[in-house]
Image: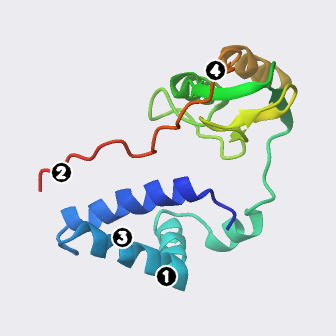
Amino acid sequence: GDVPDDLIGVTIRLTAWMLVAAGIESAIDDAEAVCRARLDDGSAYERFMKNVELQGGDPAELERQIGSRRAAHTVTVDAPRGGYVTQIDAYAFGLAGVGLGVGRNKTSDAVRPDVGFELYAKQGDRVVERQPLYTIYADNADAAREAAERLDEAYTIDDIAIVAVAPVVEEHAAL
């Protein structure tokens, strides 16, 4: 699919460490190669769909909905000025996401699969004034407005470029 390389990289690295921790692979580089091979040959996707079924979901229904489910209300937030994205407040996005129903405060809370965020600019990117930074997907206009208010200062844009921090800064393994 259309997934950013940095997200794929982090996902593969985390999954590779799980293979090492489980004793399936002994070296992280070999484990990463296995993960990439499983993505490439489609078996990771098949396993995911099997897990959906084992947890009571309908894989065929999920297939039909891929790419077509969206919340009823969207708000796209634009850059207030040009410059470089120097910081994104992930905690603010997390709190706003829980407010939308992306996550839970307690296990009995419902999770809404149609709501969330789509980010267009990441740390280190150059943006111009009024360029879209992110879109909020919400079930209703009030929830979208509340999320937008929570995220009002989530992006820091400065005149000076920075070197973006790698998605994985440091690893600690006690295996």
Please state which amino acid type lies under the numbered disc 4: Ala
The residue to which callout 2 is attached is: 173
Residue 3, horizontal then vertical, whole percent: 64, 60
Most foreground residue, 138 or 12:
12
Q: Secondary structure at mark 4?
A: loop
Residue 174, horizontal then vertical, whole percent: 12, 50
Residues at marks 4 and 2, CA–CA distance in whole angstroms = 32 Å
Crowding around mark 1 (Cα neighbors within 10 Å: few <14, some 14 to 19, many 20+) is few
The residue to which callout 4 is attached is: 154
Q: Is residue 154 visible?
A: yes
What colour scheme does the image use? rainbow
Crowding around mark 4 (Cα neighbors within 10 Å: few <14, some 14 to 19, many 20+) is some
Residues at marks 2 and 1, CA–CA distance in whole angstroms = 27 Å
Is mark 2 in CB contact (under 8 Å) with mark 1?
no
Q: Secondary structure at mark 1?
A: helix
Nearest to the eye among marks 4 and 1: give it. Answer: 4
Q: Earlier in the sequence, mark 2 or mark 3?
A: 3
Q: Earlier in the sequence, mark 4 or mark 1?
A: 1
The residue to which callout 3 is attached is: 32
Q: Earlier in the sequence, mark 2 or mark 1?
A: 1
The residue to which callout 1 is attached is: 43
In this rendering, position of residue 16 left or right of residue 70? left
